[in-house]
Amino acid sequence: MERRGLHLDGAERAVIFAEHRRGTSQREIARLLGRSASTICRELVRGRVSPGSGGRSGSGYCPQAGQRSYDRRRLRCRPRRKLLAGGALRRVVWHRLVTFRWSPEQIAATLSAMHPDEPKARVSHETIYAMIYAQPRGGLKAALVEALRQGKHRRGVGRGIGRKPGGGSAIVPESLRIIHRPEEVNARLIP
């Protein structure tokens, strides 16, 4: 069996449960799943149930308990959001963005200068942009986008070679069009 991802899935936990119940060694289960033996050992510890706790008798391992433990650990490792609705940091960012018309870069630099030793009181300009563009459509998003200097409703929409501000392509002047090339250029007689 080939490894599908970095984390164990439900089917692999079911195989671990069945093989462990059958008495297969951890190394043999690891070889069967294409995983490291330490991964199997950690999963068996994670899904260990005591005999009186409602787990299946005889196995000592419950795949559902292993999955629940995995889910709890994954929730703890996610980064905490700094610009939560109703939070003090969000109010500061909002006030400077909408009232003073500061750019997200200016806000981030000011917060960093004001709180050099307090990471929870600082936020990057990318986080501010993400807050603005994550808003649903409506008056709130319109007010935030209007506060930006570029006033773009989506990120990544910008100038490109040959683009007009209206979104169309640039029109080449008539005198520079390829059909008006001199004959000697077409014949390649002169460089």
Image (tube, rainbow, N blue to C red):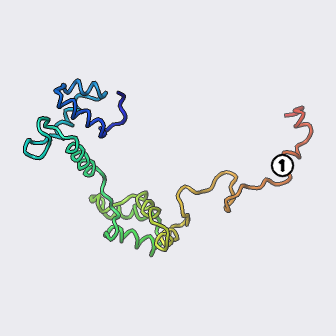
Q: Secondary structure at mark 1?
A: loop
- Vertical placement of 93 versus 120: above or below? below
Query: Residue 134: x and y, percent?
Result: 44, 62
The 10 Å Cα crowd at callout 1, few under 14, some 14 to 19, many 20 or more, is: few
Where residue 110 sits, quadrant-wise, is bottom left
Query: Residue 18: x and y, percent?
Result: 22, 32
Residue sticking out furthest to the bottom = 99
56 or 44: nearer the viewer:
56
Where residue 12 sits, quadrant-wise, is top left
Query: In this rendering, would 88 be left or right of 169?
Result: left
Residue sticking out furthest to the front = 57
Query: In this rendering, would 136 be left or right of 79?
Result: right
98 or 136: nearer the viewer:
136
Residue sticking out furthest to the right = 183
Query: Residue 141: x and y, percent?
Result: 48, 69
Identify the residue at horizontal 29%, vertical 60% (top origin): 120
Query: In this rendering, would 67 be left or right of 152?
Result: left
Residue tagged 1: 177
Query: Residue 143: x and y, percent?
Result: 49, 73
Identify the residue at horizontal 44%, vertical 70% (top origin): 97
Image quarter where the C terminus lies is: top right
Image quarter where the N terminus lies is: top left
- Vertical placement of 127 versus 58: above or below? below
- Vertical placement of 53 versus 37: above or below? below
Query: In this rendering, would 50 be left or right of 155?
Result: left
Q: Amino acid at mark 1?
A: Arg
